[in-house]
Image: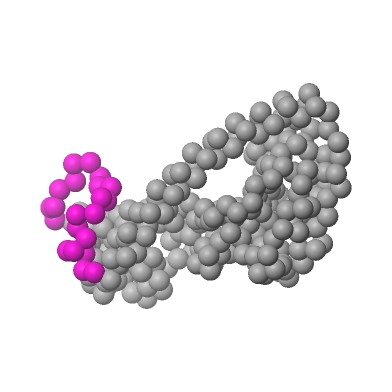
Amino acid sequence: MDLPRGERIISEKIANLEAVYKKLPEDFRGVIRIFMKFEGRLYRGDMLIDDGNILGVSLDDLDKSISSYGERALEEIKNKASKSIGDVDVYKFSEIEMSLAIDSNERILFRRAIPLDRLGVERVVVEEERKKEEEESIEKWREELGKLNEEWARLEEKWKKLESIKDLPVESIKDLPVEQEAGKKAEELAGEDLEVLKSRPKMLKGIGFTDKLRLLKFPRASNVMKLMDGKKTVEEIAEELNIDKRSIIGLMKELKKRSYI
């Protein structure tokens, strides 16, 4: 799943998975993330939960880059967890973070939420030697995840700064760090750019969480995308939001590059 960082509130070994379920507050909103080693392969499972119900489940085979979703993923997690070594982390989401998680993972959500009490894990004893070896392997993956979380935190902080000034005219935020194409000068717009300004873009799909982070470099990107209804031109949107034309052209090219328009 594409998920916001959230606040980690529980960390346990997978042997205590059932106890983790019982520790969750009735109004819990967030994700249970599981890292486990099963039959020599590493898996990551995510269960998105809100108010005692499971909204969606994904299971990624990190060694083979294979993913499963829904009921199948839920059953796989239940079956593998009882015979695996690994860790369980629980992250609490704010209302905004939960909305972002739902929006980013809409295609894999259950049509009807599943009660959390459907989960159950049978405990199995694992040999000490295999346990040590597999825990070391999982720890390496957790280190990599930690590095990714640090990057997300940095980008989230940048996002907050941009959001805090989103209603200011672009002249007031021109000194913010924005990635520019090397050597590009304030010259007349090229023919290709003029075509972009005349276009009437419309979003083809929702923006994934990772791509939302990439779009932080474009001033007021979220406001621009809300106005992209296929009727207004890019130039009209820029004028309405008082955004520099080069900035909005860069945003359009990035969205087109990633097949969002």
Please name the colour scheme applied to the rendered image.
Answer: one colour
Q: Is residue 3 left or right of residue 189?
A: right
Residue nearer the viewer, 87 or 12 = 12
Q: Residue at x 14, y 56 (%)?
A: 188
In the picture, the quarter occupied by the C terminus is bottom left
Q: Residue at x 19, y 46 (%)?
A: 184
Q: Is residue 174 magenta?
A: yes
Q: Position of residue 121 (x, y in %)?
A: 83, 50
The residue most toward the top is 129
| Location of residue 255 by image quarter | bottom left
Q: Is residue 238 left or right of residue 156?
A: left
How far across and how far down the image is residue 74, in percent?
A: 76, 54
Q: How many marks?
A: 0
Q: Which residues are magenta?
A: 168-188
Dominant secondary structure of the magenta stretch?
A: loop
In the figure, is residue 155 to the left or right of 25? left
User: Toward which corner of the image does residue 137 lie, by quadrant?
Assistant: top right
Residue 63 in view (yes/no)? no
Residue 240, above or below 44: below
Residue 101 lies, in percent from the top left, at 56, 61
- Which residue is drawn at the image coordinates 37% and 60% (left, top)? 160
Indicate yes or no whether the magenta region holds residue 120: no
Would residue 211 be seen by someone viewing this image from the given angle?
yes
Residue drawn at x 21%, y 64% as measured from the top left: 170
Give the x, y percent position of residue 89: 64, 48
Residue projecting furthest to the left = 187
Of 73 and 153, nearer the camera is: 153
Is residue 113 shown left or right of residue 180? right
